[in-house]
Amino acid sequence: MYSKYLKFIGFLSIFTIYCQGFAKSVPKKSYAASTVGLMKLLEVEDDLVENIKGYVEVLKKKLDLVEQSLITMSSEHEQMDNDYEMYLGNPVNSFRLLHRLHTDWRKWHNYALNTNKWELEPIEKAHKMRKLIPTALDLECACRGIDDLMTFYDLTPEELAAGNLAGYSKPETALTAQDCLALGEFCIGNRNKERAEAWFNTSLARFENTLKRYSAHKAWGTLLMMDQEFTAASYHFGKKPEELEHSNVDMLFENAIATKLNCSAVVKKPSRLLCRYNSSTTAFTKIAPLKMEELSTDPYMVVYHDVIYDSEIDLIFNSSQLSLSLISAGQKSEVRSSKDSYIDHTASELLDKRVTDMTGLNMDGSEAFTLINYGIGGHYVLHHDYRNLQNTTRLDEGDRIATVLFYLGDVDSGGATIFPMINITVTPKKGSAVFWYNLHNSGAMNEKTLHSACPVISGSKYVLTKWINELPQAFRTPCMNNSNLLPESNDLRLEKYVV
Ligand SMILES: O=C(O)CCC(=O)C(=O)O
Ligand SMILES: [Fe+2]
């Protein structure tokens, strides 16, 4: 199986040299940084292929069943032989027609809506492998390798896309339209507009239909909009320039602008909310109240001060693997530039209790603590913590109802956590933690929890995140209230507990 990949490995290992050259800016475990790493990735891909094959089998069985029934249904119509009156004149036929439609329709409706757990098993297995798949940083490293090749050997996107490597032609290594698009997006992050445009152009030429071309047009159009080049951008969005200036596309930038403003905000808005001791969430807080500062009521958000001791922070650092690889300064990614790892069992048991004292929530089924380190420029783009889980998956696990983010150190400058939709900036302060609800009481997702980690200007930032899941909170969160109900599919939590 591997032999057909070996030539790709030869090609990809060119990246190795480049990625090692960037050793300071690339995580050590980067797949693209070694041939051994790439071999591991092939194994991951093999497993993934097996799981997806399993899923295809499941789908085929379903498809066969539906096709078989279609054949049966059509054969009834053939029997009529265009003489409908004759057919329906027979009361048994009329009865069968009615009965068929009455019961069959329900059957098909249920069949289409219900997915059995075992049917999703192969895809769930594939999902569990997600920790093994390359990260955004791995991809970036690979893009950088290609980008450097282009610079050193004066290659154009067209040549590379056709598998032409400086006179060494390998059509089988030709790039797909999606590959070219990813390289174009990398060039935007790398502030190389000209090369980004050349990649988008190559990508557009390789996409075979308009629908697929849309993503390349959108990326290119957005790039032009950023530079206020409305006329050029209008071509990509299929709109007139004057429509574009006021269109929804502006929304793309509103958040980006809000992020910038909030990241540079130094003065907090005066608030009518309070600082107080919280002594009511658990029995323990009655004897050891926590210093709490209210930040917002929608979403509910508070900061706890001095909620984690220096000795506990030391324990976390000593026990985590992060200390082995503190080289994150300068890592760049469009999504996130940071390094994360998990903390050990003793520290997490201790902190689980603390989080319950802070939130009143049950830690069963919550996700493991993640320790994140951001170096200079380290950031995390705007995102929501909820995962927008649908149907079955949501009923099994529940979405992330709340987040607790501990700040394990002060940051010299920058690195705030910002919530642009509610205009809140939380400055990292050693020992403090911010807690907020991602979901409304109804279970619907609260869009206002959109947040981002601003780039670190100077120093280093360490945070510890805890994502708390919704289902174990059935007896802890307030009764659900219909006032903020969103459409049905958003409200499985309600359905599950109110019946
Ligand atoms: O580091 C931060 O300030 C935010 C981290 C975050 O949003 C997350 O881990 O989901
Ligand atoms: Fe987050």
Image (cartoon, rainbow, N blue to C red):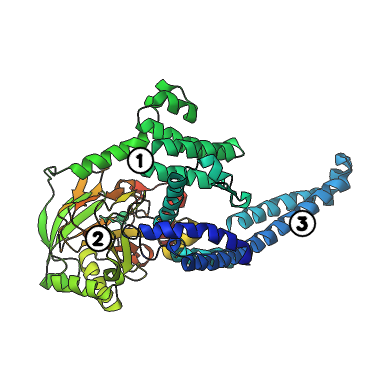
Q: Earlier in the sequence, mark 1 or mark 3?
A: 3
Give the residue type that dot 1 points to: Arg
> Residue 281: x percent and y percent?
19, 66
Question: Left or right of 263: which side holds 245?
Answer: right
Q: Secondary structure at mark 2?
A: strand
The three-letter amino acid code for the residue at tag 2 is: Leu
Cα distance between the residues tagged 2 and 3: 54 Å
Disc number at residue 68? 3
Quarter containing ligand 2?
Answer: bottom left
Q: Nearer the viewer, residue 108 or 299?
A: 299
Q: Which residue is mark 1?
A: 191
Question: Residue pushed farthest bottom?
Answer: 346
What separation in Å lies between label 1 and label 3 (alpha carbons)? 56 Å
Residue that mark 2 sits on: 405
What amino acid is labelled 3 in the image? Answer: Gln
In the image: residue 288, left or right of residue 226:
left
Q: How many residues crowd mark 3 within 10 Å: few (<14), some (14–19), many (20+)?
A: few
Label 1 element class: loop
Q: Which mark is residue 250?
A: none
Ligand 1 has an atom within 8 Å of the beta carbon of the residue at disc 2? yes
- Distance from disc 1 to disc 2, alpha carbons, whole Å, reads 32 Å
